[in-house]
Image (cartoon, rainbow, N blue to C red):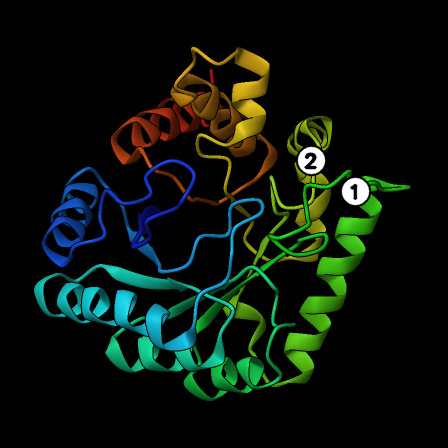
Amino acid sequence: MGILNITPDSFFDGGKYFQLDSAIAQSKKMIDEGATIIDVGGESSRPFSKSISVQEEIKRVVPVIEALKSETKITLSIDTSKYEVAKECLKAGATIINDISALRSDDRMSSLVAENNVHVVLMHMKGSPQNMQINPIYKNLIKEIKSFLKDRILFAKEKGISSEKLIIDPGLGFGKSVKHNYVILNKLSEFLDLNCPILIGSSRKSFIGKTLGSNSNRLFGTAATIAISILKGAKIFRVHDVKQTQEVIAISEAITSAKE
């Protein structure tokens, strides 16, 4: 899953693809490098980010999705928690809703997913982007995240969303300390019995930089998190660097499938 941020303030690539032509060019580059999904986002969810209006978010993302739908055959995902944005993006050609609120931000979102029979990503987040990184505390990290995801899966099914359309994301960096993120990666296989594909979004995040130091561009650190995630059972990787991730996946899968 290639990341396409149509934002001026995302933590890694904010402003780079704010214009339509640059956004389309970057998307096609990621497709050529092997991306099978492009995740389009119009609002930054980095720590302490500020929300934007529905109208502004639609203005940013819908033209990009329309253009990609017209010019490519790539699967398109919209990274939003806003019902109106998701609705317009599904009309434009998106078939996945990547909702960091796990269908909690708007009661209408679950019906939208069910009625259109599209995939939805249910992500764990403690708090909101405005406060999630202010001293996040858990009594039992994995148990609490797993319980949350189990409840959201049940909620989605009760709202008529097919189990085959559900994807889960433990939410690295969303209300997690540096240590929390590493524990999640280490214990990732404990989420497998929820019977949903696991999405991991570790790409170039600050917990990697805090471990490697300020001089690191976090690329190799990201590669390590992806390799471990593959070994632990993750299936979808939301990344900025598609080509390098494809190489990590290829070697990891060669190792895990090797037999005498």
Q: Residue at x 64, y 85 (%)?
A: 159
Please tell me how crowded label 2 is: few (under 14), some (14-19), or many (20+) other residues with Cα within 10 Å: many
Which quarter of the figure has residue 55?
A: bottom left
The residue that mark 1 highlights is 142
Going by the numbered disc 1, the residue's amino acid type is Ile
Q: How many marks?
A: 2
Residue 244 in the figure: left or right of residue 200: left
Q: Position of residue 74 (x, y in %)?
A: 22, 59
Q: Position of residue 61 (x, y in %)?
A: 28, 66
Up-down relation of residue 91 to residue 94 (above or below): below
Going by the numbered disc 2, the residue's amino acid type is Ile
The reply to whether discs 1 and 2 touch (Cβ–Cβ < 8 Å) is yes
Which type of secondary structure does the marked residue at label 2 adopt?
Answer: helix
Which quarter of the figure has residue 182?
A: top right
Q: Is residue 108 visible?
A: yes
Q: Residue at x 75, y 50 (%)?
A: 145
The residue that mark 2 highlights is 184
